[in-house]
Image: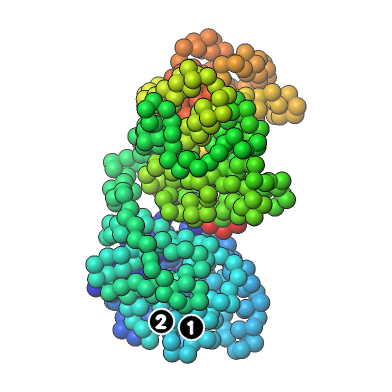
């Protein structure tokens, strides 16, 4: 979703802002723009489309050493040049960039129009710049406070004022914003990727706080304008980790990185042969009688896997709920319900809202999250980081598998504490998790036929994924992956449900991908394969590498290495990620930045 960058220092702001915007491209956007301060003049250039279009439009213009930039993912108003950010006030004194949604913008717009102010765009964001103009009294900080006190909704703002060249204000309320501390130059951005090549020293702004950023320093204030002592943090990864490293796309790089990412998730949690994750010391699992997992997108699919694993090992009733549904469902949660919120970015608006609802009802909240210091991590009572490293491709891969592995670790830890597995079984499960990185490495190797399969299946306009239990959970993710990057319609079906309607859609040459790894239900899934084959379907089966019998049943087989059945979700998604990738490549899709999608969904 929208990305913000702010810079003030001695360098050419134009270059630094464009470089930052390029690094934020992965968040998803449809227009972009910058405002650069040159003495007491603010110049703004913005454009629909890609950053390269904006870069060309700017040319060699825009001198100046401070400014703000923005990538916009349209919510209010189409992705046009006029609706793109920054928005400037009529007299050109202020320019702003905004990420989030101003919920009371209609009322504010009406009020400001009554005061004679004019609006150029259809956006909710433009009210912010007109409020600043309206309240301006010569004091930049006071004006920012007065204007933002009128806003309802979520916002991260970057603000410049022509009377104060070199000074930027950054404001945060329920949308991500991070300050970067350099030497004689400072930054802010929606995420650290934007300025990681310049500095790794950061300050996380909390909700309700704002910052005055100049080349010589950063001052943090709370909502009533009192100075707050900041907590400095250091990012542990470098710019290289956010680059393609020789791969054609970030998605492929991140698929290949999964063995390493899983090691980073798993190994630090192992102490003397047992899982003992830091962050869970004070969680008394014996006081929990129900678990509700909540998340969005792929993180929700990881939760569906987790539900099967936790129920099976811990015997605690567990459900997986979409955060966007849970937040409005009047959920029945209390202090004995553990809510597990899962998020790669840690900034997903619906997940955060579901967490707030859970906390309001007294439920303890455990976060499984990748981005350190993110809003999800800050809000949770207990945090387990996946430590997968930066994920740039919009379609998550290593983010998802590390979430599943973290849930597996949690389930084994909890089962050990509860005594629902014997110490011998706990040791067996632990060693299966420790072997997951090697297993995923082998899954990548075994999937060498997937590129070939993609070459003769990329023309299908619609397909079905079928499977049972954990295989079904895997189908959900496989189907989403394919939709996201290749735009091919697909549906995931619990194989046993086929006969209740969907089988009517199976006819000659319909492509069906059957995941048949879950040993206990293999025969059942085999029957479903035969049912669709009998109706003319083309079947690609995904099976254990030892399960050669499927070669006779299916048109193509993708083999996956065998591991503990409960943990198969991790290796078996790998060929499905690769299939989505290669099909999208065959179809010439924009794999890392699929149309209409955003990496970090910070609005509802
Ligand atoms: C977006 C991304 C998905 C992701 C979902 C949840 O839709 O494109 O890949 O699964 O958000 O994001 P989160 O950061 O909370 O895991």
Horizontal relation, residue 258 to residue 596: left or right: left
Q: Percent from the top left, x then y, of residue 500?
A: 75, 27
Residue at image position (34%, 71%) is: 218
Mark nearest the camera among 1 and 2 is: 1
Q: Tell me if residue 89 can be seen.
A: no
Horizontal relation, residue 552 to residue 530: left or right: left
Residue at image position (62%, 38%) is: 288
Q: Earlier in the sequence, mark 1 or mark 2?
A: 1
Who is closer to the viewer here, 588 or 206?
206
Are the residues flagged by discs 1 and 2 in contact, CB closer than 8 Å? yes
Residue at image position (35%, 78%) is: 167
Who is closer to the viewer here, 346 or 50?
346
Where is 19 relative to 586, above or below?
A: below
Where is 127 relative to 575, above or below?
A: below
Who is closer to the viewer here, 173 or 23?
173
User: Which mark, residue 161?
Assistant: 2
Label 2 neighbourhood size at 10 Å, few (<14), some (14-19), many (20+)? many
Q: Percent from the top left, x then y, of residue 315?
A: 62, 27
Q: Quadrant of the C terminus?
A: bottom right
Label 1 neighbourhood size at 10 Å, few (<14), some (14-19), many (20+)? some
Direction right: furthest residue: 500
Horizontal relation, residue 418 to residue 389: left or right: right
Horizontal relation, residue 565 to residue 387: left or right: right
Mark 1 = which residue?
A: 143
Q: Percent from the top left, x then y, of residue 437?
A: 38, 28
Who is closer to the viewer here, 604 or 243?
604
Q: Percent from the top left, x then y, of residue 69?
A: 40, 68
Instruction: Indicate the quadrant where residue 123 lies.
Output: bottom right
The answer for how far apart the CA atoms under marks 1 and 2 are is: 10 Å
Residue at image position (64%, 83%) is: 111
Secondary element at image label 2: strand
């Amino acid at each position: 979703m929208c990305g913000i960058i702010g810079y003030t220092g001695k360098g050419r702001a134009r270059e630094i802002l464009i470089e930052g915007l390029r690094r934020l491209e992965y968040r998803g956007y449809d227009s972009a723009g910058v405002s650069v301060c040159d003495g007491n003049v603010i110049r703004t250039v913005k454009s629909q489309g890609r950053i390269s279009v904006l870069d060309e439009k700017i040319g060699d213009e825009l001198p100046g050493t401070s400014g703000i930039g923005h990538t916009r993912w349209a919510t209010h108003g189409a992705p046009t040049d006029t609706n793109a950010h920054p928005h400037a006030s009529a007299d050109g004194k202020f320019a702003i960039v905004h990420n989030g949604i101003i919920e009371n913008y209609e009322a504010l717009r009406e009020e400001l129009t009554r005061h004679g102010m004019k609006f150029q765009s259809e956006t909710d964001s433009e009210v912010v710049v007109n409020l600043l103009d309206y309240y301006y009294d010569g004091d930049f900080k006071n004006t920012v406070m007065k204007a933002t006190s009128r806003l309802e909704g979520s916002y991260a703002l970057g603000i410049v004022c022509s009377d104060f060249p070199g000074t930027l204000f950054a404001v945060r309320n329920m949308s991500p914003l991070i300050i970067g501390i350099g030497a004689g130059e400072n930054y802010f951005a929606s995420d650290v990727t934007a300025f990681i090549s310049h500095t790794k020293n950061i300050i996380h702004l909390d909700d309700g706080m704002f910052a005055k950023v100049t080349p010589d320093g950063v001052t943090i204030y709370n909502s009533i304008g009192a100075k707050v002592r900041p907590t400095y943090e250091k990012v542990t990864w470098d710019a290289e980790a956010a680059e393609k490293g020789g791969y054609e796309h970030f998605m492929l790089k991140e698929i290949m990185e999964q063995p390493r990412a899983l090691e980073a998730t798993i190994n630090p949690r192992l102490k003397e042969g047992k899982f003992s994750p830091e962050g869970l010391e004070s969680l008394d699992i014996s006081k929990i009688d129900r678990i509700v997992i909540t998340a969005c997108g792929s993180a929700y699919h990881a939760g569906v896997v987790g539900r099967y694993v936790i129920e099976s090992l811990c015997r605690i009733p567990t459900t997986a709920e979409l955060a966007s549904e849970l937040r409005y469902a009047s959920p029945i949660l209390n202090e004995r319900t553990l809510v597990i919120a899962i998020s790669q970015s840690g900034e997903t608006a619906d997940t955060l809202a579901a967490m707030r609802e859970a906390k309001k009802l007294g439920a303890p909240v455990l976060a499984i999250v990748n981005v350190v210091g993110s809003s999800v991590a800050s809000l949770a009572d207990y945090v387990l980081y996946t430590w997968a490293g930066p994920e740039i491709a919009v379609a998550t891969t290593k983010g998802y598998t590390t979430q599943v592995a973290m849930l597996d670790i949690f389930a084994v830890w909890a089962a050990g504490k509860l005594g629902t597995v014997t110490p011998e079984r706990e040791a067996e499960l632990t060693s299966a998790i420790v072997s997951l990185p090697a297993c995923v490495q082998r899954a990548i190797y075994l999937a060498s036929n997937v590129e070939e399969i993609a070459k003769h299946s990329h023309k299908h306009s619609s397909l079905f994924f079928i499977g049972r239990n954990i295989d079904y959970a895997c189908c959900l993710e496989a189907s989403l992956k394919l939709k996201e990057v290749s735009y091919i319609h697909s549906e995931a079906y619990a194989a046993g449900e086929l006969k209740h309607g969907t089988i009517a859609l199976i006819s000659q040459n319909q492509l069906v991908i059957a995941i048949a790894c879950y040993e206990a239900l293999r025969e059942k899934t085999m029957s479903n394969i035969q049912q669709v084959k009998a109706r003319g379907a083309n079947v690609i089966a995904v099976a254990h590498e030892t399960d050669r019998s499927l070669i006779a049943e299916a048109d193509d087989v993708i083999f996956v290495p065998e591991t503990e059945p409960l943990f198969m979700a991790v290796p078996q998604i790998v060929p499905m990620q690769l299939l989505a990738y290669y099909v999208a490549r065959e179809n010439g899709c924009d794999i890392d930045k699929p149309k209409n999608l955003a990496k970090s969904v910070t609005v509802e």
